Image (spheres, rainbow, N blue to C red):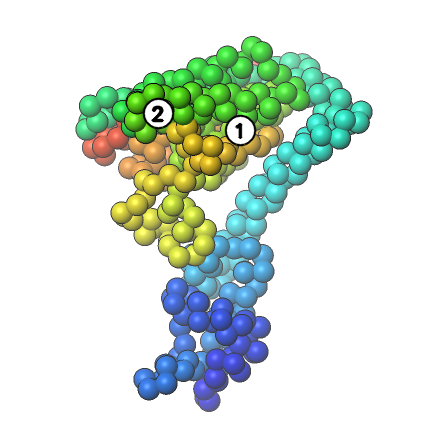
Amino acid sequence: MGELTIGAFARASRLSPKALRLYDELGLLAPARVDGTTGYRYYVEAQLPRARLVAWLRRVGMPLARIGEVCDLYETDPPAAGLVIGAYWARVETETAARRDLVTFLVDQLSGNPAGKGVEEMSEMAMSEVAMSEVRMRYAAGSDRGLVRPVNQDTAYAGARLLAVADGFGADGARASGAAVDALVALEQSVRGADVLNGLADAVDRVNRGNRGNREGGSGESGTTLTAMLWTGSRLALVHVGDTRAYLLRGGEVSRITHDHTLVQSMIDAGSLTAEEATSHPQRALLLRALDGSADHARPDLRLHDVVPGDRYLLCSDGLFTVVGPDDIRRVLTTAAEPADAVSQLIALALAEGGPDNVACAVADAVTV
């Protein structure tokens, strides 16, 4: 079989030579041969199916690291690769639907037309429907210092309308995480309907400005991450900054519904790092966003999330998911009878793995009674 120059292979695969060079560097699509003198890359026709699959997956927006996994699987088990692609796209559609709801909300709020009023009325209607069908949240939260850290800087809270987990850092981290959760607890009784996202955004801004004042007052660089969900009718309003996480158990499947604001996550998204490599990266704890008093770092993710009876939600700090694997988290979420059982079992698993960090969990079930 004859060799193809990088230009000929680029035309056949519909990938640019620049992309082919990048994919070679990342180990996605290595050439069949590299000339030792000129450095020219040569490919063979047998590589075209993988190259075309890479091109297709890039068009649908799949991260490069995930593309490599799918392509490797495709070469040994094409049907399994198809299932992975389908699962990826299902997550994309879920995230897109959440963004669509948020865009609708923002358009209604900013346009000033009757539709804005309709959002609030719709939220109140949804709350009435929930009351009629007697759906409520059953919840629990817990936190532990762990077995290594001298103090506990994690804060966890679970209430009738609010789940929250914050992970403080720095000399004043315990105060910072507690203040972040306290600011949201105050919203449980005061914010409803169309004001919920604005209320969450304002509360986060107040917390961040408080941390700025402490830093300028000589308390050092301290702050907190924060992930919280505020129940509003048939939806949960999510606010997220940093690397605390929210997971959803629905229909027996566990999915993460937050995106870490960390250096290693940005590298994973860019395709320059795999998820496995991220676990041992020397800068794996470096945050790109946090409530540390800096206006540049405090921008929260805000979204609305539809709730289905039977859903189970887990919010947790990195003291859990960095030492307890996803299979164990899924097992506990699917088998624990009550939220309190899930919280205690998850914390126990983190401690059994050495408890190197503080650990915090909040679990809530959407139940009909």
Which corner quadrant of the image does residue 129 belong to? top right
Crowd around label 1: few <14 · some 14–19 · many ≥20 (10 Å): many
Report if residue 199 is visible in the image: yes
- Amino acid carrying mark 1 in the image: Leu
Indicate the position of residue 243 as horizontal and vertical percent values: 40, 35
Which corner quadrant of the image does residue 286 belong to? top left
Under circle 2, the secondary element is helix
Q: Residue at x 39, y 57 (%)?
A: 272
Above or below, 71 against 108 in this view is below
Q: Residue at x 35, y 25 (%)?
A: 215
Name the quadrant of the N terminus: bottom left
| Residue pointed to by mark 2 | 215
Q: Residue at x 54, y 71 (%)?
A: 15
Indicate the position of residue 268 as horizontal and vertical percent values: 41, 51
| Residue pointed to by mark 1 | 238
Under circle 1, the secondary element is strand
Report the Cα–Cα distance between label 2 and label 1: 27 Å
Name the quadrant of the C terminus: top right
Viewer-side residue, 88 vs 103: 103
- Amino acid carrying mark 2 in the image: Arg
Position of residue 178 in the picture relative to residue 313 (left or right): left
* Mark before the other along the chain sequence, 2 or 1: 2
Above or below, 270 against 8 in this view is above
Above or below, 97 against 155 in this view is below
Q: Residue at x 32, y 40 (%)?
A: 285
Viewer-side residue, 179 vs 369: 179
Crowd around label 2: few <14 · some 14–19 · many ≥20 (10 Å): some
